[in-house]
Image (cartoon, helix red, strand yellow):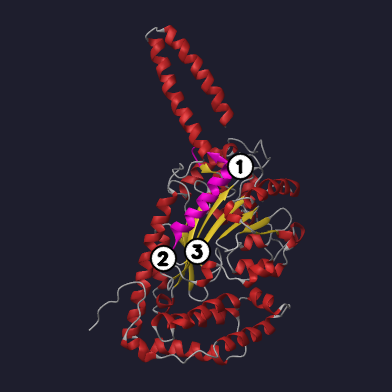
Amino acid sequence: MKFQNLMASTGEWLRGEGPHHQVVVSSRVRLARNLRNRAFPGWAKKAERTIILELIKPRVEELPEMQEPFSELLQDLSALEKQVLVERHLISREHAAKSVGSAVIMNRKQTLSVMVNEEDHLRMQSIRSGLQLRQAFKLVDKVDSALEGKLDFAYDTKLGYLTACPTNVGTGMRASAMLHLPGLVLSDLINQVIQAVNKIGLAVRGLYGEGTEAMGNLFQISNQTTLGEKEEEIISRLNKVIETIIEKEQDARQVLIQKRPNTLWDQIGRAYGLLTYAHAMTSKEALNLLSVVKLGIDLGAFPEDKRLGIDQLFIETQPAHLQKSTQQKLNAEERDHFRAQIIRERLKSFPKPDISKVAREPETGDSEPEKHE
Amino acid sequence: MQKVNLCEGCSKEKGVQDPTGFALADLLLGIGAAEEIEKGGSSTRCPVCGFTQADFKKTGRLGCSSCYVAFAEGLNSLLKAMHKGTAHVGKLPSRAQKTLALSDRMKTLTEDLRKAVQEENYETAAALRDEIKQLESQLAGSK
């Protein structure tokens, strides 16, 4: 599969059809594995990295899950193409910085992606839309079991799977979900939630993982520890916490509708106005405003059939996607103009926010609406 | 925040030479991580890949899977502070499952042998010893 085809079709998770999709954008599970007695990628010399790559890559490509895969060596991808993959969460930012001796292999549906020689020799990731951590784990676990028969993974009876960083040792598993939490942000409750989540040993991060800013009211929540707990236990613990956060988010939205309707409609109206009429917009501003419009759709202020268009804009307005679609390199100012133009065009057929619809029948999505008299 | 990439020479010139500034291990794994590893003192260099404690201090990453053996002492307390437990309870590779079954069998046999010797049942003991030897070579092969 060529990069062009990959670019043309959005991944399954971008279509946003999974359970609890109003709050949970996507679920990801990744497993880290290494070959026994081979230097980890960060310590291996170029020649050894290449040997490791040649051992692993064909084994991954021959997996039944990887029919007609997108498989590229990192040195054969342009900086822009790598960035597109980062924006789709198909490779990490760290992997995008790699070149000779590293590769990425993914399936056509973009639900399974395997990085070779990232921080570990193998990083296998499954990504699904909505809250589907169990399904994501199932796929990546199956792939791991198939590969372990063909590759000699570094495994210790006491410590489990051995990884380059001691923070990943044991299961080598990181399970994470991307949550859209505008209600909690608008109600100034988000910091409380983040603190509570941190306290129970889970991490909350921004849009692109470690050390990144929270934009578009998007937050990633993931397990911190990998040793001393079974994979299924980690996932069910994470699931429970996410379900609680979904409830809190829905509650926050209801409180906003009931107690602070003016603030809410003001935010939605401003977001609509700016997105419809602005001629220059940074990706951060775009994400923040699109987030509020997405909230408007959740609440019923905009028609449901406009959801996909907005969800797609979250990705299409990211810097690399923008430049890849125009086929030319743009400077920051040109990008901001072009971004605003794309958004204006997409919102042409977008009706004005209809607040009356929300007041009559609050759309609470996944959880039961609370009864207010 | 502004990110500046400096080479070794420039960093010295600019006075960025505070050794603690380069203890990435502390930054990534929590303060004290780098020292913890040094306390271990079991070995300073991994015999398989040549990675040193100083390298760990600098990068916060290990060199290869054998580093876990070479730096075991220091790593143990580090892992204890970092994780829920100190032993893996999750997935076993099927190869490890076989090894586990073999080593369980080994335990039983060793115990039986001890009893047989105690009871001066030398015929049984000899048979057990043969079986243990066979199992030992199987275990060595599966590792």
Q: Which residues are magenta?
A: A132-159
**Along the line of sight, which residue is nearer the eye, B111 or A341?**
A341
Identify residue type, mark 2: Gln
Measure the alpha-carbon separation of dots 3 and 2. Answer: 26 Å
Chain identity of mark 3: A
Disc 1: which residue: A150
Residue at horizontal 44%, vertical 28%?
B104
Residue at horizontal 77%, vertical 58%?
B9
Chain identity of mark 1: A
Q: Is residue A208 visible?
A: yes
Q: Are marks 3 and 2 on the same chain?
A: yes
CB contact under 8 Å: marks 1 and 2: no
Tell me the mark number nearer the camera, choosing from 1 and 2: 1
**Along the line of sight, which residue is nearer the eye, A373 or A198?**
A373
Identify residue type, mark 1: Lys
Mark found first going from the N terminus, 1 or 2:
1
Chain identity of mark 2: A
Q: Is-magenta flag for residue A145?
A: yes
Q: Is-magenta flag for residue B73?
A: no
Identify residue type, mark 3: Arg
Q: Which numbered tag is attached to residue A29?
A: none
Label 1 neighbour load within 10 Å: few <14, some 14-19, many 20+: few
Label 3 neighbour load within 10 Å: few <14, some 14-19, many 20+: many
Q: Is residue A301 above or below residue B62?
A: below
Q: Which numbered tag is attached to residue A195?
A: 2
Disc 3: which residue: A128
